[in-house]
Image: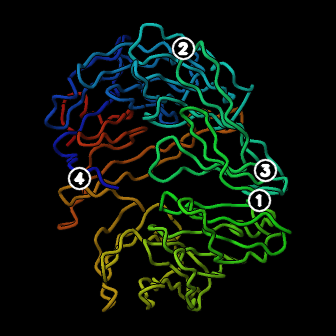
């Protein structure tokens, strides 16, 4: 992940709390975030605030606005505040009343419209973010409870999609097996207009490069192209068991709905109507979660460019690798397990005793190159640049933190880039890394009556790989957000105490 011109040292907007106890009152806005040129405390905690180290305090960035609270998510008199990053205006946000959680927004012609969910997962609409009418109401036209009611940030689409899942013990993701299905509902941001049911599907995938367009599969094997914006649906194919889009907009890989024993897999070209036979699934009855020990069986994996298709067999061993343009197959090297695609190359596990061995296989160019040999810990390949790769290696017993390495595949020479990091450090434009280290797991707001968000307090750091100097931005942060091309906003309810008398992060 990259944020282009983001330089956290230059612009680091924050919400920081003070530990001292004084007379009660509202929080105080201290700065206009959009004019900041250095790390600055923009909102002070309300007088009298003392942070509970076991509590999660929420922060959400919606466009130019930051919603946050200095109250526990389950406090009966909780108050959320709305801070305008461009004007410095700070006002209560009563629409996000106690009992509502996980605010997120859609982009409409009239501005941002905000949604949230209650404790049992029921979606509510809070109205326009900058509007006067902020009375929260249940989204009309939806069933009593459904999944997918909570999401993050701002959806650029002028609609919100809600999902009602229908579970099954017979499997999922394929037609004709009595598996799990999902009903879609679209709501367009008007609290007086009911949500529209779009259909009940066993599988759905976005169409590459087409906003609001999806390929959707019904349980009877009909594959449609669905326009979520209009609700229009076009029948494309019948007799489809399972499908996987390719990177090319006008092609998909699909498996026929046949005898459920051995079923043919094709690549279909929508431009010509042609089907190219590429493989056969002869373990169909074990596929699509019907065998609990073979969760990936039946799925198709596709390279980033869409030119290669990998068919997984039992225990994630490759059954076939084939080119999607001409059905040419490739001799698969010996391996224990398929890990995934890295561009047009494939990551394979080739050894696991006594050491773990991971290789890159290039089916088209040929050649197998080892990039990791060592302890049996979590390892994640992050980048390939010719003969050079970067990967994260977790510490023993802790998959959340470890070391970032660079290795020359030709020589095997390794260079340690980051001594201590998470698996996903964010590289900034100036070559430094931003890292959020998990400190403590906290119970976050509810997604439904039985599911809660698992949040963490985090220590935010900057590190320069050139000198391995780690600079603290803030510790014990309960929530933060990266704002592209601007900086970072975060909530630090535990202090540090120096934030009470200084506007600088460091």
Crowd tier of the residue under label 2, counting other residues whose Cα lies within 10 Å: few below 14, some 14–19, many 20 or above: few
Nearer the observer, disc 1 or disc 2?
Answer: 1
| Residue 204 percent location from the top left of the image | 63, 50
- The residue lying toward the viewer, choosing from 335 and 112, is 112
| Residue 213 percent location from the top left of the image | 53, 44
Q: Regarding mark 2 in the picture, which secondary structure is present there?
A: loop
Q: Regarding mark 3 in the picture, which secondary structure is present there?
A: loop
Q: Find the distance from the CA under tag 4 to the CA under tag 2.
A: 37 Å
Which badge, 3 or 2, comes first in the chain's sequence?
A: 2
Q: Regarding mark 1 in the picture, which secondary structure is present there?
A: loop
As drawn, 377 above or below 472: below
In the displayed structure image, the side of residue 41 where residue 222 appears, left or right: right
Residue sitting at x 32%, y 91%: 410
Q: Are marks 4 and 2 in contact (CB under 8 Å)?
A: no
Residue sitting at x 19%, y 43%: 506
What numbered label is drawn on residue 239?
1
- The residue lying toward the viewer, choosing from 19 and 302, is 302
* Picture quadrant where residue 195 is located: top right
Nearer the observer, disc 4 or disc 1?
Answer: 1
Q: Circle 3 sits on which residue? A: 219
* Picture quadrant where residue 364 is located: bottom left
Q: Find the distance from the CA under tag 4 to the CA under tag 1.
A: 58 Å
In the displayed structure image, the side of residue 345 where residue 261 appears, left or right: right
Residue sitting at x 30%, y 87%: 413
In the displayed structure image, the side of residue 135 where residue 391 appears, left or right: left
Q: Find the distance from the CA under tag 3 to the CA under tag 1.
A: 10 Å
Which badge, 3 or 1, comes first in the chain's sequence?
A: 3
Q: Circle 2 sits on which residue? A: 77
Q: Find the distance from the CA under tag 1 to the CA under tag 2.
A: 55 Å
Q: Circle 4 sits on which residue? A: 471
Which badge, 4 or 2, comes first in the chain's sequence?
A: 2
């Amino acid at each position: 992940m990259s944020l282009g011109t983001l330089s956290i040292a230059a612009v680091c907007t924050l919400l920081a709390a003070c530990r001292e106890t004084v007379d009660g009152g509202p929080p105080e806005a201290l700065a206009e975030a959009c004019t900041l040129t250095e790390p600055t405390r923009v909102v002070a905690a309300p007088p009298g605030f003392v942070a509970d180290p076991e509590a999660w305090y929420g922060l959400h960035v919606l466009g130019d606005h930051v919603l946050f609270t200095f109250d526990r998510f389950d406090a009966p008199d909780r108050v959320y505040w709305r801070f305008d990053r461009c004007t410095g205006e700070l006002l209560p946000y009563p629409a996000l009343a106690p009992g509502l959680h996980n605010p997120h927004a859609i982009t409409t012609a009239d501005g941002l419209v905000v949604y949230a969910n209650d404790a049992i997962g029921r979606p509510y609409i809070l109205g326009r973010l900058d509007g006067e009418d902020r009375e929260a109401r249940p989204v009309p036209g939806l069933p009593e409870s459904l999944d997918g009611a909570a999401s993050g940030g701002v959806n650029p689409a002028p609609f919100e999609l809600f999902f009602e899942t229908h579970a099954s013990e017979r499997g999922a993701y394929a037609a004709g097996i009595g598996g799990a299905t999902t009903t879609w509902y679209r709501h367009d941001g008007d609290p007086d207009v009911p949500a529209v049911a779009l259909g009940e599907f066993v599988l759905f995938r976005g169409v590459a490069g087409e906003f609001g367009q999806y390929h959707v599969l019904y349980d009877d094997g009909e594959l449609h192209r669905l326009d979520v914006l209009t609700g229009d649906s076009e029948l494309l194919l019948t007799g489809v068991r399972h499908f996987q889009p390719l990177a090319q907009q006008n092609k998909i890989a699909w498996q026929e709905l046949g005898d459920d024993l051995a079923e043919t897999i094709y690549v279909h070209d929508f431009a010509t109507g042609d089907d190219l036979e590429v493989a056969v699934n002869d373990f169909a009855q074990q596929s699509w979660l019907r065998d609990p020990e073979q969760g990936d069986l039946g799925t198709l994996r596709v390279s980033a460019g869409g030119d290669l298709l990998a068919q997984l067999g039992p225990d994630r061993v490759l059954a076939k690798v084939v080119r999607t343009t001409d059905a040419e197959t490739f001799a698969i090297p010996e391996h224990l397990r398929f890990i995934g695609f890295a561009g047009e190359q494939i990551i394979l596990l080739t050894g696991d005793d006594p050491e773990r061995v991971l290789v890159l296989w290039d089916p088209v160019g040929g050649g197998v190159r080892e990039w990791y040999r060592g302890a049996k810990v979590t390892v994640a390949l992050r980048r390939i640049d010719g003969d050079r790769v970067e990967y994260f290696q977790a510490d023993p017993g802790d998959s959340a933190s470890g070391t970032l390495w660079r290795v020359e595949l030709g020589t095997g020479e390794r260079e340690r880039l980051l001594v201590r990091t998470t698996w996903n450090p964010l590289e900034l434009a100036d070559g430094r890394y931003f890292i959020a280290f998990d400190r403590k797991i906290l119970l976050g707001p509810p997604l439904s009556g039985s599911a809660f968000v698992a949040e963490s307090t985090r220590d935010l750091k900057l590190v320069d790989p050139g000198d391995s100097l780690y600079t603290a931005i803030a510790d014990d942060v309960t929530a933060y957000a990266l704002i592209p091309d601007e900086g970072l906003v975060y909530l630090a309810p535990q202090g540090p105490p120096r934030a009470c008398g200084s506007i600088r992060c460091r």
